[in-house]
Image (cartoon, coloured by chain):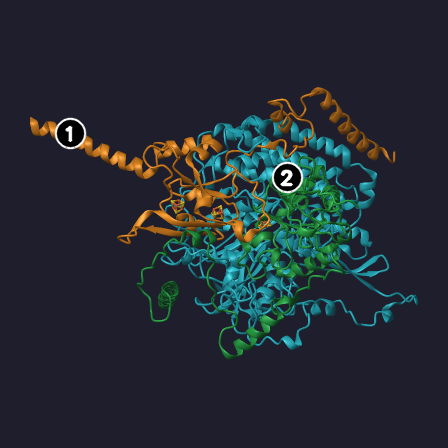
Chain colours: A orange, B green, C cyan
Amino acid sequence: MYGQGIARGLLVTMKHIARSYMDDIRYAGRKYSGEGNFGTRQGMQATGSYTVQYPDEKVAVPERFRFIPFLIVEDHDHPERPGHDWCTSCGICAKVCPPQCIWIVRGRNPQTGRPVPEPDAFYIDIDICMNCGYCSEFCPFDAIKMDHDYELASYDRTSAHIFDKQKLSKEMSHWKRIAPTTALEEMQARGGWEHMDIIREKAKAERAAARARKSAPKQSS
Amino acid sequence: MAQTDLRALQDTEFPVPEELQANIAITSLDKIYNWSRRSSMWPLLFGLACCAIEMIGTAASRFDFSRFGFEVMRGSPRQSDLMIVSGTVTKKMIVPIVRLYNQMPEPKYVLAMGACASGGGPFKEGYNVVSGVDKYLPVDVYVPGCPPTPQALLYGMITLQKKIDGQSLANLDDVPWYGVGPSEPTPVPVLGPDIIDPRQMELIREQAQQAALEAPFGARELPAWVNPAEVAQETTVVEETQDGAEDGIDPATAARIRKREEAMARLAARRAAKGGQ
Amino acid sequence: MMDVVADKTQLDISASIELLRERWPDAISHDNRDGFSGIIVDPAQLDDVALAIRDELGFDYLSSVTGVDYLGIADHMEVVYHACRTSGGPALVFKAQTGRDDPRVPSLVSVWPGADFQEREAYDLYGIHFDGHPDLRRILLWDGFDGHPLRKDWQEAYFEEEHKPFDSRWPGGQVYRAEEKNVFGKNVRYPDDLDLGRLNDVSESDLYQGLGLGVDVQALDSDGLRTDRLVVNLGPHHPSTHGVFRMVVTLDGETIASLDPVMGYLHRNHEKIGERNSFLHNMPFTDRLDYISSMSNNLGYALAVEQLLSQGARYSPPTYRAECLRVLMVELTRIVNHLWSLGFLLNDLGAFFTPMLYANNEREKILDFFEATSGSRLMCNYMRFAGVYRDIPERIRSVANLVNDKVRDYNTMDYLTEMVNERLPRFLDEYDTLLTRNEILRERTVGVGVLLAEDAIALSTCGPLLRASGVPYDVRRADPYSIYPELDFNIPAGKNGDIYDRFLVRFQEMRESVRILKQILPRLEQSQGEAVVTKIGHTPRVPVGEAYGRVENPKGELGYYVVSEGDPKGPQNPWRYHVRAPSFINLTALGPMCVGHKVADVVTILGSIDIVLGETDR
Ligand code: SF4
Ligand code: SF4
Ligand code: SF4
């Protein structure tokens, strides 16, 4: 019969309307407030989809989320080198960056003029950055990571949209907080929470010590 | 009428001209005007590129920007207050964009969504890409990201509302459309051999004359961008090693020339080798 | 030996080439360059050879046409053709070479009408003249544009260096904005002989001339009624053009007399930038082609480069798990794309936003998974050469970072299982009830925009558009890649080739995708723990040669033609990087499909092709 298809379709929309009220009852009182049911509302079990009440409730982004990169520095309470850059200014990120929006000035010792493993300056033009994540993926020192803060809108781009080193730098604890699993995996790959260079040096020193221990008894015998 | 000093009632955050400071009408009117403008911002239904997909995602039920009064997207510029430039602005497209902007009734706002609309984005170096819509239109809010997630866009929209909240009728820089006389439309660019901005005619003419005398057109090097923070700190500029510098050519260019020559030589050698086979 | 084979349309590629070489020993030679394949045809004989290839050898489907500029290597231009059989099998590659100064080759539009837009593109970007092309004018750029940008000696205003990475970034990276190095502060550069006195906008002169504007059309009317033909511009700003697409429609009353698509409003110079990028750099750029289905774009490009890489030493193909993950992502993408396109088709039909919203709800769920796996909702950048970015996470979990952040935590496999086994099938059934038998929908779509099977093949259309016309051609079956040969799925095809059939084909494809996903999930469980991250670093050594990787994107056959120069010490970037964009080539059929229909049907027909502008204009 003509019109049957339309009627069935309308029934579906009616069902959707009814369901939204049924959910009101199901989550009565805690629809937008209760703990834990945010995950349910935004998950597979929810019927339809729920509006995220944005400024009052934000969908926390997953760990691998990538937005603008940031540079890791040691925590301010690090015992040996607080606030020290992890970046060694090796330039890999500037090479792999597809739109070439990273500028690095390699650090130099002011006295000798020889390169030192930290950048003098580090810029990212976030009006070019395509949030691809290559810089963090290929950085051999785990020194650049993708930040999760997307609330960056501004009134003026000339001053606000070239991030310099100061603006890019964030503490290691920040990375541990926003991406605990990834940070842990990286730590295991590196062999410790320290910077790769320090771990290597320590390992070298240990090896040397072991060698010394090994050779010492020989001499005495 | 007795003069009462009503300064206490004013939003002191925002500049009010001296002679108007005791004027109660301005502040209350501001609030009403701002509230009405910010709460019924109708965006132009206008998607350019990838960012538009996220914009539609923001309009859909999960993020739903109509909660903030961005209610309906209008297909006609005549009915809209806000232009969300969502995506890469190309030279071919900037002409219709400026026309659309001119057709929008005032008050009107522009929100540059994404890296492309703000400053060219990943495609900035392309020959058909405009490096930021603000080269042609006044932009109120820039939302970085590629693409900005729906939440980032919502944040940008709220930022725009905050900007409106801070505007004052007393300050014609904020609200030029309440000034005297009709406002001037933005000149529409022309597609010639490349895009021509009518506002730059003088400069182009001057450059053309110069090019007739010198070579090559438009390739004059300008000083590089200086980070204001750096100037304040007066950091020492690192001296580049001078190896490979030839007279009159800076080392970077020399290196580039050398690299290119080497590549060409290798290609030629390989071609010769192949030819010999 | 040749004449033993009765049916020449079954010959494989090398036998076909031999046959052609016997016929035209002088005009055809093997392409003997390292890593290249196919034949080089003398342009003078190209017409005849092409006819033989189509009619005798049965290569009825012209997949791609593109130009290559070999400046500095061989000093000629080359036009590369890839022809396939709709019955399946790999592509036959043939090329025509011509000088750089006045490049000319005969047009093949008369043999394969689908070459129309592609030849225009080659003309636009390379300046290659196709003799005999009915309508050779610029397609992506505007008339009067200065130069042909893909020529190797053409440089844009913001040109910095031939190859990335640029020297100025490290170690002495003095930051600047490109506009600061340009006198005009903009991305512009004018020719030396710019004459501002004679400046008038000629950017559309060829277009309007082609429409016969200024011709006295009244004389054409035979019925004595004096009607004027009306030219209407739909777009580039139009709510139903799915982006910045423009159609110049000539109307006779309400009926469409002719339709001319105008594009290039989103021409982002993908190929020019791609030839400057390194091989890896291009991966995130492919996301931005068809920005609704970024995962599949990634896969096509990865396949093309893997073809090249596999010629070199020390290349190990992706692991089984990596292949499973690729198929998982690609099929989810197909669902995402079809949900989006059906929603918008309904939008165009006037069912404003409700079907779109319903579809988008499910889409968001899939995007959540993409975001948790690859890091971004849209621009996934997930595939790598010989692998993928990372394995799927154990849990889809978020961490509260900003004020008011609310967290979610799901087990990924549970999430996927629930989605594939319960949620998507349930939704598809519901959507089916909502739409498929709706009488209004059927009245608007049945018999509208009909494309016959032979036209569809001749016009090189692909994807659901081709299949709805009754040609079951799907690259996943015709030229299989990844693990598709071992998966069990059908290729839905229509009968009538109208909008309604396209709607049904897309719907059925989603169901088939769900079926594939159901087969993938157990494979993922089994291959748990296998490495998926590639060992190829960020600058792989890509051997010399050419490769054409093609995949069945949701929108149709997406092909990447990549030429590597392979200079062992030089920069590792593609010499030529061409995208065979399904949306672009499908639009060839738009004009013929629309003629004779009412103007209100134009947007529906366009909606049923399902274009995305990032890919059309590139
Ligand atoms: S790759 Fe890492 S260590 Fe090297 S310069 Fe970049 S951020 Fe620094
Ligand atoms: S995210 Fe990508 S585009 Fe952005 S800085 Fe890193 S490498 Fe460059
Ligand atoms: S900013 Fe990124 S996502 Fe947005 S239009 Fe540009 S390339 Fe596309």
C134 relative to A84, above or below:
below
Residue A4 in the figure: left or right of residue C298: right
The chain to which mark 2 is attached is C
Number of the front mark, 2 or 1: 1
Query: Callout 2: helix, strand or loop?
Result: helix
- Expressed as whole percent of the image width and height from the top left, the position of residue C344 reads 72, 44
Q: Quadrant of residue C472?
A: top right
Residue in front for this viewpoint, C554 or B117: B117
Q: Which residue is mark 1?
A: A214
Q: Which residue is mark 2?
A: C336
Tags 2 and 1 touching, CB below 8 Å: no
**Tags 2 and 1 on a common chain:** no
- Expressed as whole percent of the image width and height from the top left, the position of residue B232 reads 44, 52
- Expressed as whole percent of the image width and height from the top left, the position of residue B200 reads 61, 68
- Expressed as whole percent of the image width and height from the top left, the position of residue A14 reads 79, 29
Query: Callout 2 environment at 10 Å: few (<14), some (14 to 19), or many (20+)?
Result: many
Residue in front for this viewpoint, C472 or C402: C402
A51 relative to C28, above or below:
above
Q: Amino acid at mark 2?
A: Val
Query: Callout 1 environment at 10 Å: few (<14), some (14 to 19), or many (20+)?
Result: few
A51 relative to B214, above or below:
above
Query: Callout 1: helix, strand or loop?
Result: helix
